[in-house]
Image (tube, helix red, strand yellow):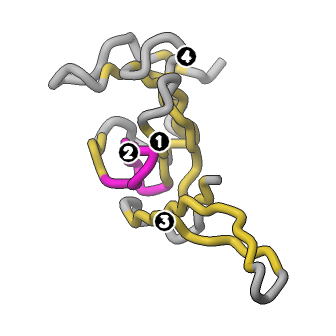
């Protein structure tokens, strides 16, 4: 289970059982502190290899799903809080973001410029 915290940290935890003490507890398997503020969105890529998070700090972070080690950071992609992030269900390197600046965008993690789709103004 992945748990995102208000301080920008992410934890991979598992429900464990202590036969000696006869109780269940949450055991931290890995942790990461890659954001400077509240995590607002979290998704796992279709192939199950990466965790993608967005934050109030206006960044998107790509982490290895098992170790929570940083693979990539996207910054300066929105002018306001990034409210959500999602991974494409067919192509694990394609992600979408939306932000409080009223813009939604698509990104390709394989390319240096990353941006692949027109930004759409969400205000009507």
In this picture, is 92 found above or below 13?
A: above
Mark 4 Cα shell of 10 Å, populated few (<14), some (14-19), many (≥20): few
Image marks 1 and 2: residues in contact by CB distance under 8 Å: yes
Residue drawn at (51%, 18%), measured in percent from left and top?
A: 88
Q: Quadrant of residue 107?
A: top left
- State the SS at label 2: strand
Task: Say which residue label 1 marks.
Answer: 51
Image marks 3 and 4: residues in contact by CB distance under 8 Å: no
The reply to whether residue 79 is in sight is yes
Query: For the magenta stretch, what is the residue range?
Result: 56-69
Q: Is residue 89 magenta?
A: no
Image marks 4 and 2: residues in contact by CB distance under 8 Å: no
Tell me the CA gap for discs 3 and 2. Answer: 14 Å
Task: Say which residue label 2 marks.
Answer: 64
Specify whether 34 is left or right of 38: left
Tell me the CA gap for discs 1 and 3. Answer: 13 Å
Mark before the other along the chain sequence, 3 or 2: 3
Image location (x, y in percent) of residue 48: 50, 31
Image location (x, y in percent) of residue 115: 29, 20
The reply to whether residue 37 is in sight is no
Mark before the other along the chain sequence, 3 or 4: 3
Tell me the CA gap for discs 4 and 2. Answer: 17 Å
Task: Say which residue label 4 marks.
Answer: 89
Tell me the CA gap for discs 3 and 4. Answer: 25 Å
Image marks 4 and 1: residues in contact by CB distance under 8 Å: no
Task: Say which residue label 3 marks.
Answer: 9
Tell which tag, 4 or 2, sits nearer the viewer. Answer: 2
Q: Is residue 62 magenta?
A: yes
- State the SS at label 1: strand
Mark before the other along the chain sequence, 4 or 2: 2
Image location (x, y in percent) of residue 46: 52, 23
């Amino acid at each position: 289970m992945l748990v995102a915290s208000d301080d920008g940290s992410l934890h991979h935890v598992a429900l464990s059982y202590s036969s000696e003490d006869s109780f269940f507890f949450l055991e931290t398997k890995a942790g990461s502190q890659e954001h400077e503020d509240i995590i607002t969105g979290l998704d796992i890529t279709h192939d199950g290899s990466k965790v993608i998070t967005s934050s109030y700090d206006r960044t998107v972070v790509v982490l290895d799903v098992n170790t929570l080690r940083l693979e990539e950071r996207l910054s300066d992609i929105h002018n306001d809080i990034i409210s959500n992030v999602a991974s494409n269900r067919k192509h694990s390197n394609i992600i979408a973001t939306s932000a409080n600046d009223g813009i939604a965008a698509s990104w390709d993690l394989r390319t240096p410029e990353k941006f692949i789709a027109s930004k759409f103004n969400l205000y009507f």
